[in-house]
Amino acid sequence: MEFKRGIWRYVVLPELVCSGIVLGFAIGFLLFEPLMSAREENRVEVAVSDELPEWQHLTLIFTGDLMQHLPQVYAAQQQNDSMDYTSCFSRLKGYFSSADFVVANLETTLGEPPYSGYPQFRSPTVLAGAMRQAGIDVAALANNHICDRGGNGIRSTLDALDRAGIRHTGAWADTVPADNHPLWLEKGPFRVALFNYTYGTNGIPVPRGCFVNGIDTIRMGHDIVEARQNGASHVIVFLHWGNEYEAVPNRVQRSLSDFCRRAGAEIVIGSHPHVVQSLETVKDSSGRIVGMTAYSLGNFVSNQRQPGTDGGISVRIGLTLSEETNKTEYIPEYLIHWTAIMKDHKSRSGHRYEIIPAYAEETLPENLRPGLNRFVERTRRYMSRYNSGFREITCGF
Protein backbone atom coordinates (compact mmCIF):
# COMPACT_ATOMS: atom_id res chain seq x y z
CA MET A 1 0.00 0.00 0.00
CA GLU A 2 1.06 3.62 -0.45
CA PHE A 3 -0.03 6.86 1.13
CA LYS A 4 -0.69 10.08 -0.73
CA ARG A 5 -2.06 13.27 0.80
CA GLY A 6 -3.27 11.31 3.79
CA ILE A 7 -5.48 8.91 1.82
CA TRP A 8 -4.78 5.18 1.96
CA ARG A 9 -4.45 3.89 -1.57
CA TYR A 10 -4.90 0.13 -1.77
CA VAL A 11 -2.53 -1.94 -3.84
CA VAL A 12 -2.53 -4.94 -1.51
CA LEU A 13 -4.10 -8.27 -2.37
CA PRO A 14 -7.51 -9.04 -0.82
CA GLU A 15 -6.12 -11.86 1.33
CA LEU A 16 -3.79 -9.38 3.03
CA VAL A 17 -6.47 -6.86 3.86
CA CYS A 18 -7.84 -8.54 6.98
CA SER A 19 -4.47 -8.79 8.70
CA GLY A 20 -3.68 -5.21 7.72
CA ILE A 21 -6.89 -3.96 9.26
CA VAL A 22 -6.19 -5.80 12.51
CA LEU A 23 -2.66 -4.34 12.68
CA GLY A 24 -3.98 -0.89 11.82
CA PHE A 25 -6.61 -1.16 14.52
CA ALA A 26 -4.02 -2.08 17.14
CA ILE A 27 -1.70 0.77 16.16
CA GLY A 28 -4.56 3.23 15.93
CA PHE A 29 -5.87 2.25 19.34
CA LEU A 30 -2.50 2.80 20.99
CA LEU A 31 -1.88 6.14 19.29
CA PHE A 32 -5.35 7.55 19.63
CA GLU A 33 -6.40 6.34 23.08
CA PRO A 34 -5.47 9.74 24.60
CA LEU A 35 -7.54 11.54 21.97
CA MET A 36 -10.46 9.17 22.36
CA SER A 37 -10.41 9.39 26.12
CA ALA A 38 -10.55 13.17 25.86
CA ARG A 39 -13.19 13.29 23.14
CA GLU A 40 -15.83 14.58 25.54
CA GLU A 41 -13.73 17.71 25.89
CA ASN A 42 -13.85 18.17 22.12
CA ARG A 43 -17.55 17.39 21.75
CA VAL A 44 -19.46 20.42 20.59
CA GLU A 45 -22.51 21.34 22.65
CA VAL A 46 -25.16 22.44 20.18
CA ALA A 47 -26.84 25.66 21.22
CA VAL A 48 -30.51 26.01 20.32
CA SER A 49 -31.45 29.63 19.72
CA ASP A 50 -34.59 31.29 21.08
CA GLU A 51 -36.05 31.38 17.56
CA LEU A 52 -35.99 27.57 17.28
CA PRO A 53 -38.66 25.32 18.82
CA GLU A 54 -37.97 23.49 22.05
CA TRP A 55 -36.61 20.56 20.07
CA GLN A 56 -35.41 19.84 16.57
CA HIS A 57 -35.74 16.60 14.65
CA LEU A 58 -33.53 15.06 11.97
CA THR A 59 -34.29 11.83 10.10
CA LEU A 60 -31.70 9.79 8.20
CA ILE A 61 -32.18 6.71 6.00
CA PHE A 62 -29.34 4.38 4.94
CA THR A 63 -29.63 1.67 2.29
CA GLY A 64 -27.41 -1.28 1.47
CA ASP A 65 -25.66 -2.29 -1.74
CA LEU A 66 -27.10 -0.69 -4.88
CA MET A 67 -25.74 -3.06 -7.50
CA GLN A 68 -26.17 -3.38 -11.26
CA HIS A 69 -25.59 -6.81 -12.72
CA LEU A 70 -26.01 -7.01 -16.50
CA PRO A 71 -29.55 -8.46 -16.36
CA GLN A 72 -30.56 -5.31 -14.48
CA VAL A 73 -29.01 -3.13 -17.16
CA TYR A 74 -30.78 -5.10 -19.90
CA ALA A 75 -34.07 -4.76 -18.03
CA ALA A 76 -33.67 -0.97 -17.95
CA GLN A 77 -33.31 -0.82 -21.74
CA GLN A 78 -36.69 0.04 -23.24
CA GLN A 79 -38.13 -0.98 -26.61
CA ASN A 80 -37.39 2.54 -27.90
CA ASP A 81 -33.71 2.11 -26.87
CA SER A 82 -33.95 4.58 -23.96
CA MET A 83 -32.84 3.55 -20.47
CA ASP A 84 -35.36 3.77 -17.63
CA TYR A 85 -34.82 2.84 -13.97
CA THR A 86 -37.84 4.72 -12.63
CA SER A 87 -39.89 1.69 -11.65
CA CYS A 88 -36.99 0.16 -9.71
CA PHE A 89 -37.24 2.67 -6.87
CA SER A 90 -40.78 3.99 -7.28
CA ARG A 91 -42.32 2.09 -4.35
CA LEU A 92 -39.87 3.72 -1.92
CA LYS A 93 -40.47 7.38 -2.80
CA GLY A 94 -42.93 7.87 0.05
CA TYR A 95 -40.62 6.15 2.53
CA PHE A 96 -37.62 8.17 1.39
CA SER A 97 -39.61 11.40 1.63
CA SER A 98 -39.97 10.75 5.38
CA ALA A 99 -36.23 11.48 5.80
CA ASP A 100 -34.16 14.64 5.59
CA PHE A 101 -31.26 12.73 4.02
CA VAL A 102 -31.14 9.34 2.26
CA VAL A 103 -27.71 7.72 1.87
CA ALA A 104 -27.08 4.74 -0.46
CA ASN A 105 -24.00 2.61 -1.07
CA LEU A 106 -23.50 2.84 -4.86
CA GLU A 107 -21.63 -0.33 -5.74
CA THR A 108 -21.04 0.26 -9.44
CA THR A 109 -19.38 2.84 -11.64
CA LEU A 110 -21.46 4.97 -14.01
CA GLY A 111 -20.58 5.80 -17.60
CA GLU A 112 -21.32 5.32 -21.26
CA PRO A 113 -21.54 1.93 -23.04
CA PRO A 114 -20.28 -0.72 -23.26
CA TYR A 115 -21.82 -1.67 -19.91
CA SER A 116 -20.60 -4.53 -17.78
CA GLY A 117 -21.59 -6.48 -14.70
CA TYR A 118 -19.64 -8.69 -12.33
CA PRO A 119 -16.72 -8.63 -11.68
CA GLN A 120 -16.06 -5.09 -12.97
CA PHE A 121 -19.21 -2.98 -13.03
CA ARG A 122 -20.13 -0.15 -15.40
CA SER A 123 -23.75 1.03 -15.49
CA PRO A 124 -25.74 3.69 -17.39
CA THR A 125 -25.45 7.25 -16.12
CA VAL A 126 -29.24 7.58 -16.10
CA LEU A 127 -29.24 5.41 -12.98
CA ALA A 128 -28.12 8.49 -11.04
CA GLY A 129 -31.15 10.46 -12.22
CA ALA A 130 -33.51 7.66 -11.15
CA MET A 131 -31.85 7.54 -7.74
CA ARG A 132 -32.33 11.26 -7.28
CA GLN A 133 -35.92 11.15 -8.50
CA ALA A 134 -36.64 8.48 -5.90
CA GLY A 135 -35.24 10.70 -3.14
CA ILE A 136 -31.66 9.49 -2.66
CA ASP A 137 -29.52 12.45 -1.56
CA VAL A 138 -26.06 10.96 -1.00
CA ALA A 139 -24.00 8.19 -2.62
CA ALA A 140 -21.32 6.45 -0.54
CA LEU A 141 -18.56 5.50 -3.01
CA ALA A 142 -15.79 3.95 -0.89
CA ASN A 143 -16.33 0.29 -1.79
CA ASN A 144 -14.52 -2.55 -3.52
CA HIS A 145 -15.95 -1.75 -6.98
CA ILE A 146 -15.25 1.98 -7.26
CA CYS A 147 -12.01 1.33 -9.19
CA ASP A 148 -13.54 -1.23 -11.56
CA ARG A 149 -13.18 1.08 -14.59
CA GLY A 150 -10.07 2.96 -13.54
CA GLY A 151 -9.73 6.71 -13.34
CA ASN A 152 -12.20 7.30 -16.17
CA GLY A 153 -14.79 5.27 -14.30
CA ILE A 154 -14.35 7.28 -11.13
CA ARG A 155 -14.55 10.58 -13.00
CA SER A 156 -17.62 9.59 -15.04
CA THR A 157 -19.35 8.35 -11.88
CA LEU A 158 -18.74 11.63 -10.08
CA ASP A 159 -19.89 13.60 -13.12
CA ALA A 160 -23.13 11.61 -13.39
CA LEU A 161 -23.89 12.08 -9.71
CA ASP A 162 -23.13 15.81 -9.90
CA ARG A 163 -25.44 16.25 -12.87
CA ALA A 164 -28.21 14.41 -11.05
CA GLY A 165 -27.77 16.54 -7.92
CA ILE A 166 -26.60 13.67 -5.71
CA ARG A 167 -23.88 14.48 -3.21
CA HIS A 168 -21.13 11.90 -2.70
CA THR A 169 -18.17 11.01 -0.55
CA GLY A 170 -15.54 8.30 -0.12
CA ALA A 171 -13.87 8.66 -3.55
CA TRP A 172 -12.50 11.64 -5.47
CA ALA A 173 -11.03 12.31 -8.91
CA ASP A 174 -8.51 14.89 -7.71
CA THR A 175 -7.82 16.62 -4.42
CA VAL A 176 -10.18 15.94 -1.52
CA PRO A 177 -12.34 19.04 -0.98
CA ALA A 178 -12.68 20.23 2.59
CA ASP A 179 -16.49 20.18 2.39
CA ASN A 180 -16.60 16.60 1.08
CA HIS A 181 -14.58 14.80 3.73
CA PRO A 182 -16.47 14.65 5.90
CA LEU A 183 -19.68 15.26 4.00
CA TRP A 184 -21.71 17.63 6.15
CA LEU A 185 -25.45 16.95 6.57
CA GLU A 186 -27.01 19.99 8.19
CA LYS A 187 -30.44 20.92 9.46
CA GLY A 188 -31.25 23.34 12.27
CA PRO A 189 -28.96 22.61 15.22
CA PHE A 190 -27.71 19.40 13.59
CA ARG A 191 -24.32 19.43 11.91
CA VAL A 192 -23.63 15.79 11.07
CA ALA A 193 -20.24 14.63 9.76
CA LEU A 194 -20.53 11.62 7.43
CA PHE A 195 -17.37 9.59 6.73
CA ASN A 196 -17.05 6.68 4.27
CA TYR A 197 -14.23 4.09 4.11
CA THR A 198 -13.63 0.72 2.41
CA TYR A 199 -11.55 -2.35 3.26
CA GLY A 200 -10.11 -2.35 -0.27
CA THR A 201 -10.73 -2.21 -4.02
CA ASN A 202 -10.45 -5.88 -5.05
CA GLY A 203 -6.70 -5.57 -5.46
CA ILE A 204 -7.08 -2.91 -8.18
CA PRO A 205 -4.73 0.02 -7.47
CA VAL A 206 -6.40 3.38 -7.01
CA PRO A 207 -5.67 5.26 -10.27
CA ARG A 208 -3.02 7.95 -10.18
CA GLY A 209 -4.54 11.28 -9.20
CA CYS A 210 -7.66 9.68 -7.70
CA PHE A 211 -8.38 9.02 -4.04
CA VAL A 212 -10.38 6.36 -2.23
CA ASN A 213 -10.80 6.32 1.54
CA GLY A 214 -9.40 3.12 2.99
CA ILE A 215 -10.07 1.70 6.43
CA ASP A 216 -7.12 2.99 8.44
CA THR A 217 -7.75 3.53 12.14
CA ILE A 218 -5.00 6.14 12.45
CA ARG A 219 -6.58 8.26 9.73
CA MET A 220 -10.12 7.55 10.98
CA GLY A 221 -9.26 8.57 14.53
CA HIS A 222 -7.84 11.88 13.28
CA ASP A 223 -10.88 12.43 11.06
CA ILE A 224 -13.43 11.93 13.80
CA VAL A 225 -11.64 14.10 16.36
CA GLU A 226 -11.09 16.84 13.75
CA ALA A 227 -14.78 16.75 12.81
CA ARG A 228 -15.69 17.32 16.45
CA GLN A 229 -13.29 20.24 16.64
CA ASN A 230 -14.87 21.68 13.49
CA GLY A 231 -18.35 21.72 14.98
CA ALA A 232 -19.85 18.28 14.35
CA SER A 233 -22.86 17.67 16.55
CA HIS A 234 -22.91 14.00 15.48
CA VAL A 235 -20.55 11.69 13.55
CA ILE A 236 -21.55 8.82 11.26
CA VAL A 237 -19.10 6.31 9.80
CA PHE A 238 -20.21 4.29 6.73
CA LEU A 239 -17.88 1.27 6.36
CA HIS A 240 -17.50 -1.23 3.51
CA TRP A 241 -16.26 -4.26 5.42
CA GLY A 242 -16.86 -7.86 6.52
CA ASN A 243 -17.04 -11.16 4.68
CA GLU A 244 -19.46 -11.72 1.83
CA TYR A 245 -22.53 -13.90 2.54
CA GLU A 246 -21.73 -14.31 6.25
CA ALA A 247 -24.74 -13.45 8.42
CA VAL A 248 -22.76 -12.80 11.61
CA PRO A 249 -20.31 -9.88 11.93
CA ASN A 250 -16.71 -10.98 12.28
CA ARG A 251 -14.15 -9.94 14.89
CA VAL A 252 -12.65 -7.19 12.71
CA GLN A 253 -16.05 -5.58 12.17
CA ARG A 254 -16.78 -5.59 15.88
CA SER A 255 -13.36 -4.16 16.70
CA LEU A 256 -13.75 -1.38 14.14
CA SER A 257 -17.25 -0.56 15.35
CA ASP A 258 -15.97 -0.27 18.90
CA PHE A 259 -13.06 1.87 17.70
CA CYS A 260 -15.38 4.28 15.91
CA ARG A 261 -17.62 4.56 18.94
CA ARG A 262 -14.67 5.22 21.26
CA ALA A 263 -13.29 7.81 18.84
CA GLY A 264 -16.55 9.74 18.94
CA ALA A 265 -18.93 8.36 16.29
CA GLU A 266 -22.51 7.75 17.39
CA ILE A 267 -23.63 5.79 14.31
CA VAL A 268 -21.79 3.10 12.32
CA ILE A 269 -23.35 1.74 9.11
CA GLY A 270 -21.96 -1.28 7.24
CA SER A 271 -22.15 -2.67 3.71
CA HIS A 272 -20.50 -5.37 1.52
CA PRO A 273 -21.59 -8.81 2.88
CA HIS A 274 -24.72 -8.77 0.60
CA VAL A 275 -26.76 -10.30 3.41
CA VAL A 276 -28.31 -8.70 6.46
CA GLN A 277 -26.24 -8.68 9.63
CA SER A 278 -27.11 -7.67 13.19
CA LEU A 279 -28.39 -4.32 14.40
CA GLU A 280 -27.13 -3.15 17.79
CA THR A 281 -27.72 -0.14 20.00
CA VAL A 282 -25.47 1.16 22.78
CA LYS A 283 -27.07 2.54 25.94
CA ASP A 284 -25.77 4.56 28.85
CA SER A 285 -26.28 3.72 32.53
CA SER A 286 -29.76 5.26 32.45
CA GLY A 287 -30.86 3.10 29.53
CA ARG A 288 -30.78 5.95 27.00
CA ILE A 289 -29.55 5.05 23.50
CA VAL A 290 -26.27 6.85 22.81
CA GLY A 291 -25.11 5.03 19.68
CA MET A 292 -25.76 2.20 17.25
CA THR A 293 -24.23 -0.08 14.62
CA ALA A 294 -25.87 -1.69 11.59
CA TYR A 295 -23.24 -4.22 10.54
CA SER A 296 -24.68 -4.95 7.08
CA LEU A 297 -27.87 -3.81 5.36
CA GLY A 298 -27.69 -6.52 2.70
CA ASN A 299 -28.56 -5.77 -0.92
CA PHE A 300 -30.66 -2.74 -1.74
CA VAL A 301 -31.09 -3.99 -5.30
CA SER A 302 -29.18 -6.63 -7.26
CA ASN A 303 -29.60 -9.68 -9.47
CA GLN A 304 -28.40 -12.03 -6.75
CA ARG A 305 -31.09 -14.59 -5.97
CA GLN A 306 -29.50 -16.92 -3.42
CA PRO A 307 -31.40 -17.08 -0.11
CA GLY A 308 -30.61 -13.97 1.91
CA THR A 309 -29.13 -12.01 -1.02
CA ASP A 310 -32.37 -11.24 -2.88
CA GLY A 311 -33.20 -8.32 -0.59
CA GLY A 312 -32.06 -6.35 2.41
CA ILE A 313 -33.03 -3.73 4.94
CA SER A 314 -32.70 0.00 5.16
CA VAL A 315 -32.43 1.74 8.51
CA ARG A 316 -34.22 4.95 9.43
CA ILE A 317 -32.78 6.82 12.39
CA GLY A 318 -34.60 9.73 13.98
CA LEU A 319 -32.62 12.20 16.08
CA THR A 320 -34.37 14.59 18.43
CA LEU A 321 -32.34 17.25 20.23
CA SER A 322 -33.84 18.72 23.39
CA GLU A 323 -33.08 22.32 24.30
CA GLU A 324 -33.61 21.49 27.96
CA THR A 325 -31.07 18.66 28.20
CA ASN A 326 -29.01 19.31 25.04
CA LYS A 327 -28.99 15.55 24.53
CA THR A 328 -30.10 13.51 21.55
CA GLU A 329 -32.88 10.96 21.66
CA TYR A 330 -32.65 8.30 18.96
CA ILE A 331 -35.43 6.37 17.26
CA PRO A 332 -33.75 3.51 15.31
CA GLU A 333 -35.96 1.57 12.88
CA TYR A 334 -35.54 -0.77 9.92
CA LEU A 335 -37.56 -1.61 6.81
CA ILE A 336 -37.34 -5.01 5.12
CA HIS A 337 -37.47 -4.98 1.31
CA TRP A 338 -37.10 -7.56 -1.42
CA THR A 339 -36.13 -7.32 -5.11
CA ALA A 340 -38.87 -8.57 -7.42
CA ILE A 341 -38.23 -9.44 -11.07
CA MET A 342 -41.49 -8.67 -12.84
CA LYS A 343 -42.68 -9.05 -16.43
CA ASP A 344 -42.57 -5.82 -18.44
CA HIS A 345 -43.39 -5.62 -22.15
CA LYS A 346 -41.77 -2.15 -22.36
CA SER A 347 -38.35 -3.61 -21.56
CA ARG A 348 -36.25 -5.26 -24.26
CA SER A 349 -35.51 -8.07 -21.81
CA GLY A 350 -39.19 -8.49 -20.96
CA HIS A 351 -38.55 -7.87 -17.26
CA ARG A 352 -38.06 -5.09 -14.75
CA TYR A 353 -36.62 -4.98 -11.24
CA GLU A 354 -38.60 -3.45 -8.39
CA ILE A 355 -37.70 -2.99 -4.73
CA ILE A 356 -40.74 -4.16 -2.76
CA PRO A 357 -41.22 -3.09 0.90
CA ALA A 358 -42.41 -5.83 3.25
CA TYR A 359 -45.74 -4.08 3.76
CA ALA A 360 -46.56 -4.11 0.01
CA GLU A 361 -47.29 -7.84 -0.42
CA GLU A 362 -50.84 -7.26 -1.63
CA THR A 363 -49.62 -5.12 -4.52
CA LEU A 364 -47.59 -7.99 -5.99
CA PRO A 365 -48.81 -10.57 -8.51
CA GLU A 366 -49.76 -13.82 -6.78
CA ASN A 367 -46.80 -15.72 -8.22
CA LEU A 368 -44.26 -13.33 -6.67
CA ARG A 369 -45.70 -13.16 -3.16
CA PRO A 370 -44.04 -16.39 -1.92
CA GLY A 371 -40.59 -14.96 -2.72
CA LEU A 372 -41.26 -11.79 -0.76
CA ASN A 373 -42.74 -13.72 2.14
CA ARG A 374 -39.78 -16.12 2.33
CA PHE A 375 -37.32 -13.25 2.51
CA VAL A 376 -39.38 -11.31 5.04
CA GLU A 377 -39.88 -14.32 7.29
CA ARG A 378 -36.20 -15.24 7.07
CA THR A 379 -35.17 -11.69 8.00
CA ARG A 380 -37.64 -11.49 10.88
CA ARG A 381 -36.35 -14.77 12.32
CA TYR A 382 -32.84 -13.39 12.09
CA MET A 383 -33.81 -10.11 13.72
CA SER A 384 -35.54 -11.91 16.58
CA ARG A 385 -32.08 -13.15 17.52
CA TYR A 386 -29.67 -10.47 16.32
CA ASN A 387 -31.52 -7.18 16.68
CA SER A 388 -31.04 -4.98 19.72
CA GLY A 389 -33.06 -1.79 19.98
CA PHE A 390 -34.27 -1.31 16.38
CA ARG A 391 -37.99 -1.40 15.60
CA GLU A 392 -39.35 -2.80 12.33
CA ILE A 393 -41.36 -0.48 10.08
CA THR A 394 -44.48 -2.41 9.06
CA CYS A 395 -46.82 0.24 7.62
CA GLY A 396 -46.83 1.94 4.26
CA PHE A 397 -46.10 5.52 3.20
Image (cartoon, helix red, strand yellow):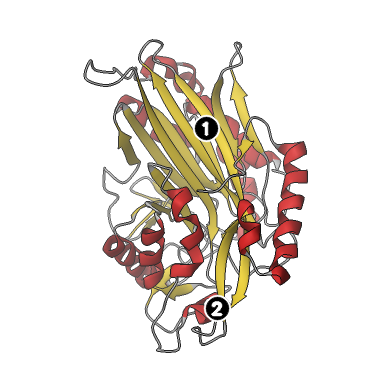
Q: Secondary structure at mark 2?
A: helix
The residue shown at (52%, 82%) is 74
Using the rendered view, name the quadrant where residue 9 is placed: bottom left
Q: Secondary structure at mark 1?
A: helix
The residue shown at (59%, 11%) is 286
Frontmost residue, 288 versus 145: 288
Q: Is residue 216 above or below residue 327?
A: below
Frontmost residue, 18 versus 329: 329
Mark positioned earlier in the residue sequence (1 or 2): 2
Q: Amino acid at mark 2?
A: Leu
Q: Is residue 67 above or below residue 59?
A: below
Q: Is residue 1 above or below residue 73?
A: above
Q: Which mark is residue 155?
A: none
- Determine which residue is flagged by label 1: 260
Question: Residue 45: x, y in percent?
Answer: 34, 17
Frontmost residue, 208 versus 282: 282
Decide if residue 207 is in sight here.
no
Frontmost residue, 194 versus 85: 85
Q: What whole-number distance in Å separates the C-alpha atoms at marks 1 and 2?
A: 36 Å
Question: Residue 32: x, y in percent?
Answer: 48, 26
The residue shown at (26%, 48%) is 177
Q: Is residue 378 above or below residue 156?
A: above
- Determine which residue is flagged by label 2: 70
Using the rendered view, name the quadrant where residue 119 is placed: bottom right
Question: Residue 256: x, y in percent?
Answer: 58, 37
